[in-house]
Amino acid sequence: MKKILFSTVLTLSLLGATALFARNSEPVVVKITNIPTSEGKVLLTTTDGTYYGITDATAPSVEIELGQIPDGKYTLYVFHDANGNYVIDQEGDLPTEYCATAEIEVTAECRTFMVPLVDIREQVARKRGEQ
């Protein structure tokens, strides 16, 4: 009887652990919006570059799927590489291509995020006009 009980508990434990790890292997989907043109690429990376993705800029919004990201907090860096040189172009200190950063927290319940791109030059000009 003890052997049957032990086997049952062990089996249920392993099934529970498998379900727990399966959640962490689900992909993270990032929907990038406000892409100004359908030229070039959209690039996305986390702070340390461990997770990254790239897709063609085919519409005003695209999705990039990042696979098997463990639960946790991440900073995303995204930009529209309109000319396809894989570098965010700048004039002085300001990016000339639409870009964004986003703080996200990946959990079992939250694995889809939306990041709107912005024109930093336009934001800076607006702030200067308000002062």
Image (cartoon, grey):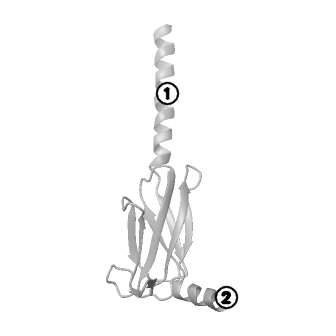
Tell me which label, 1 or 2, sits earlier in the chain: 1
Mark 1 and mark 2: Cα distance apart in space: 62 Å
* Residue in view at x 31 percent, y 83 percent: 85
Tag 1: amino acid: Ser
Q: Which mark is residue 13?
A: 1
Q: Which mark is residue 88?
A: none
Tag 2: amino acid: Gln
Q: Is residue 104 above or below residue 82?
A: above
* Residue in view at x 49 percent, y 62 percent: 75
Q: Secondary structure at mark 2?
A: loop
For the C terminus, the image quarter is bottom right
Is residue 111 visible to the viewer in this orientation of the structure?
no
Q: Secondary structure at mark 1?
A: helix
Nearer-the-camera pick, 98 or 124 = 124
Q: Is residue 80 left or right of residue 130?
A: left
* Residue designated by label 2: 131
The single residue placed furthest to the right in the displayed view is 130
Q: Which label lies toward us, 1 or 2? A: 2
